[in-house]
């Protein structure tokens, strides 16, 4: 990969932007790994690969890749059901699927997903993260499912927090709430000059400082002194146990990671609308780059990645001008874990849970529901069905339910037809209206309406709201127009009906008597 030689001003911008993204990414890499049921070091490894490798290959140069909250839930389910050793082969399969899709130029098709499903998926993921990380905020372990986490909240509150007696759970939740509070206040009241400093970093620094000053007995982040100790190559035996469930998990990761990546890339393009030299995304190349990254993550035993909107928006806002910023942010992550691993071991796990709870709540947006409601009740129902199914079953099932309902809605819209008549003030004059799509499955409805028209009427046909009409319905109308003369019925084709391309293929209009 060749870099265009940057001028000194652009180099400074990319350098400073990379530091901002690094500060945003580091706590999220560790926290999302914990939420996935893996060690923080595996999230750091994914962040390094996402920055250096995918950053150099990316089709969206200003997008930043790494561990994403959107995949934490499904990775947690994979590790729970198949074990950590199955994750490597699954990620390698998912990465290969992404590469094939990119080579086949399917990049834009991954964006062709109903917004109701996307918003419902993100809200479901956000709610699951909140339910899961609530227990980590209390320095405990999350349960296996969303419902199990929900049921365990009561005992955790009244057995750990209350009665107030200075327990470990109380200390942990105070630090986690401190992190959330700092993030909320910083987001709302941060000075303009300091807007690029991430609230998550301030919160974690504050919680870590308090924990170290008071020597609190809590769970702390565990990272090895040598990053190579984290690498776990897949074995031949792990590939021999690939079954339908593992293939399904690989497809789910490929689908969700690709959709999230390309939606994020589209958002990055929009963020550059006011820039003098915007850098547009090559969606197929981006898909291939993500596939290479996830294949490599699977090979070294890391967790999956996507293009992430939080880090990407920070990159654009910090003034990044090229892919150099994303690559350097990966270098800084590698440097800190290689040179200062002891610094990361000072961070309480509950503080990372606070960051993830804040992130989870941000994925549940009331404005998404209001936006969907503008298009009717059905998109809202699809949103709720996707969200509830994800929480009560699993992520893949929830997405499949949402996609299935979207297809059903599409089929309904493609075949729905409203046919009705209205009498005019003039005696014997009847208006016949067609609204929607006239297909062969609606012939019984059309026939029933036509049979109700009284003999001797003058029928005015209106097609301004007719989207399409197939050959079978055209034949039916032609036959009815021909036979209606025997019943004393006159047919008047209104001007818009005469101009309609479908009626133009039918019999010529019969003039009124």
Image: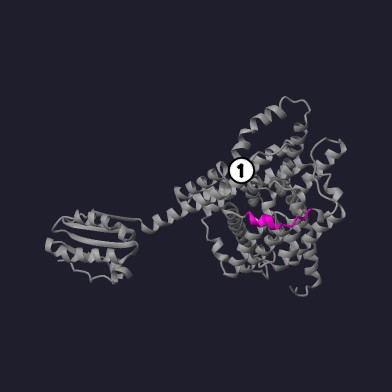
Vertical placement of 486 versus 27: above or below? below
Kindly tell me whether residue 65 is visible in this rendering: no
Image quarter of the C terminus: bottom left
Q: Say which element carries label 1.
A: helix
Q: Which of the 4 image quadrants contains residue 511?
A: bottom left
Looking at the picture, tell me which residue is in the foreground, 5 or 393. Answer: 393
The x and y percentages for residue 291 are: 65, 63
Q: Which of the 4 image quadrants contains residue 238?
A: bottom right
Instruction: Please say which color scheme the image uses.
Output: one colour
> How many residues crowd mark 1 within 10 Å: few (<14), some (14–19), many (20+)?
many
Looking at the picture, tell me which residue is in the foreground, 306 or 311. Answer: 306
- For label 1, the residue is 127
Residue 236 lies within the magenta run? yes
Image quarter of the N terminus: bottom right
* Side of 364 relative to 184 (left or right): left
Vertical placement of 81 versus 243: above or below? above
Which residue is pictured at 66% across the width and 63% down the height?
290
The x and y percentages for residue 180 are: 72, 42
Number of numbered labels in the structure image: 1
* Side of 376 relative to 348 (left or right): left
The x and y percentages for residue 231 are: 77, 56
Residue 152 lies within the magenta run? no
Which residue is pictured at 70% across the width and 27% down the height?
159
Which residue is pictured at 35% across the width and 56% down the height?
416
* Side of 411 relative to 171 (left or right): left
Segment tinted magenta in the rendering: 230-241
The x and y percentages for residue 370 are: 52, 48
Looking at the picture, tell me which residue is in the foreground, 182 or 114. Answer: 114
Kindly tell me whether residue 359 is visible in this rendering: yes
């Amino acid at each position: 990969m060749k870099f265009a030689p940057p001028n000194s001003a652009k180099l400074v911008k990319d350098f400073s932007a990379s530091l901002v993204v690094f500060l945003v990414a580091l706590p999220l890499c560790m926290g999302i790994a914990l939420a996935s049921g893996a060690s923080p070091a595996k999230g750091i490894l994914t962040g390094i690969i996402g920055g250096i490798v995918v950053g150099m290959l990316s089709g969206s140069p200003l997008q930043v890749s790494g561990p994403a909250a959107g995949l934490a839930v499904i990775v947690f389910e994979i590790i729970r059901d198949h074990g950590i050793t199955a994750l490597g082969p699954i990620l390698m399969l998912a990465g290969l699927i992404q590469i094939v899709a990119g080579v086949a130029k399917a990049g834009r098709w991954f964006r062709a997903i109903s917004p109701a499903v996307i918003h419902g998926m993100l809200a479901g993921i956000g709610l699951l993260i909140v339910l899961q990380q609530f227990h980590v905020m209390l320095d405990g372990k999350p349960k296996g499912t969303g419902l199990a986490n929900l049921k365990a909240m009561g005992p955790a509150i009244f057995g750990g927090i209350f009665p107030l007696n200075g327990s470990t759970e109380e200390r942990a939740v105070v630090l986690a709430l401190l992190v959330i509070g700092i993030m909320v206040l910083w987001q709302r009241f941060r000075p303009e000059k300091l807007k690029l400093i991430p609230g998550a970093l301030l919160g974690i620094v504050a919680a870590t400082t308090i924990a170290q000053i008071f020597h609190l007995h809590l769970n702390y982040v565990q990272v090895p002194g040598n990053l190579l100790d984290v690498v776990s190559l897949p074995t031949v035996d792990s590939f021999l146990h690939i079954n339908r469930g593992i293939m399904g998990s690989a497809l789910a990761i490929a689908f969700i990671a690709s959709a999230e990546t390309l939606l994020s890339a589209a958002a990055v393009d929009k963020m550059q609308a006011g820039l003098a030299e915007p850098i547009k995304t090559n969606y197929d190349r981006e898909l291939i780059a993500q596939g290479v990254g996830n294949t490599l993550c699977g090979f070294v035993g890391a967790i999956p990645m996507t293009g992430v909107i939080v880090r990407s928006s920070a990159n654009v806002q910090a003034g990044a001008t090229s892919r150099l910023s994303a690559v350097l942010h990966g270098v800084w992550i590698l440097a800190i874990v290689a040179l200062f691993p002891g610094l990361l071991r000072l961070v309480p796990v509950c503080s990372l849970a606070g960051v993830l709870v804040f992130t989870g709540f941000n994925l549940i947006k009331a404005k998404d529901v209001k936006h969907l409601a503008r298009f009717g009740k059905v998109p809202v129902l699809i949103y709720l069905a996707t969200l509830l199914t994800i929480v009560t079953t699993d992520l893949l099932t929830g997405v499949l339910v949402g996609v299935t309902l979207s297809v059903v809605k599409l089929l309904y819209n493609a075949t729905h037809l409203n046919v009705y008549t209205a009498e005019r003030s003039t005696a014997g004059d009847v208006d016949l209206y067609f609204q929607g799509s006239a297909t062969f499955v609606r012939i019984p409805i059309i026939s029933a309406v036509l049979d109700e028209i009284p003999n001797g009427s003058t029928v005015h046909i209106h097609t301004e709201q007719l989207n399409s009409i197939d050959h079978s319905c055209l034949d039916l109308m032609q036959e009815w127009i021909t036979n209606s003369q025997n019943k004393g019925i006159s047919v008047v084709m209104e001007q818009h009906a005469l101009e309609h391309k479908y009626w133009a293929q039918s019999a010529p209009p019969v003039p009124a008597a």
